[in-house]
Image (cartoon, coloured by chain):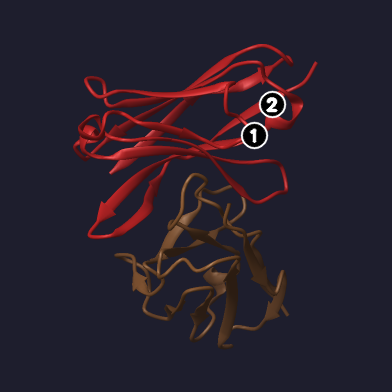
Amino acid sequence: DIQLTQSPSFLSASVGDRVTLTCRASQGISNYLAWFQQKPGKAPKLLIYGASTLQSGVPSRFSGSGSGTEFTLTISSLQPEDFATYYCQQLDSYPPFSFGPGTKVDFK
Amino acid sequence: VQLVQSGGGLEQPGRSLRLSCAGSGFIFGDYAMNWVRQAPGKGLEWVAFISTKDYGGATEYAASVNGRFTISRDDSKNIAYLQLNSLKTEDTAVYYCTRGFLSGSNYRFDYWGQGTLVTVSS
């Protein structure tokens, strides 16, 4: 099974900060990676698929990049509504459609 | 597009539960469906997948539930189900249904239900 790791586990940031989250896969997954945002008590929300394609309706301050084993999610200017937990997911080799352990973005 | 979940609740170890996920706003039979769960305070865990009838309604399961859970679908009712048998305390989680969308070579879980809590305890 493909394992995903995310770093950092926790990130403290301020409104307006540029934030970069990293997801690493245990083997190459081409660009078959998605990013989700989850707020407490809510279902995950798809942000990015195909490593870099923005899901419809997602603000352009979110961007994704990477291929193979290393991927990044960047928020260009952190907004108050962006404080949440972010998960990556691989869709290259399944089952399982594994998720990373998450990065929690909190107020500094 | 909406996915509305029902079922869940408190059940004893070894017993069974069935979760439902009703889709609307799209042609339900054209999409694969998945279930994903989240234990209290933990991350996301994919649980089960069912393909469309065009792909034979194929199913896949996480190793942790294989042989105990069954995913199914009734396209005439626009509902996906997850039957949870031989429940264990470690099955306690919020369960989400999610639509699987394939465009080109990219597959994604694009819409999610609201989640339903399953608590397994004696």
Residue under pointer 1? B64
Callout 2: few (<14), some (14-19), or many (20+) C-alpha neighbours within 10 Å? Answer: many
Report which colour depicts chain A.
brown
Q: Residue visible at 44% across and 30% down?
A: B5
Q: Quadrant of residue B20?
A: top left
Under mark 1, the amino acid is Ser
Q: Please name the residue shown 35% across and 46% down the image.
A: B100
| Quarter of the image that includes the C terminus of chain A | bottom right
Residue A44 on image: x %, y %:
50, 53
Helix, strand or loop at label 2? It is strand
* Mark 1 element type: loop
Identify which amino acid the numbered label 2 is placed on: Thr
Horizontal and vertical percent position of residue B71 = 44, 25
Respond whether the residues carrying marks 1 and 2 are from the same subunit: yes
The chain under label 1 reads B
Residue linked to disc 2: B119
Which image quadrant is residue A31 in? bottom left
Q: Which chain is red?
A: B
Label 1 or label 2, whichever comes before in sequence order: 1
Using the numbered discs, state the Cα–Cα distance from disc 1 to disc 2 in whole angstroms.
17 Å
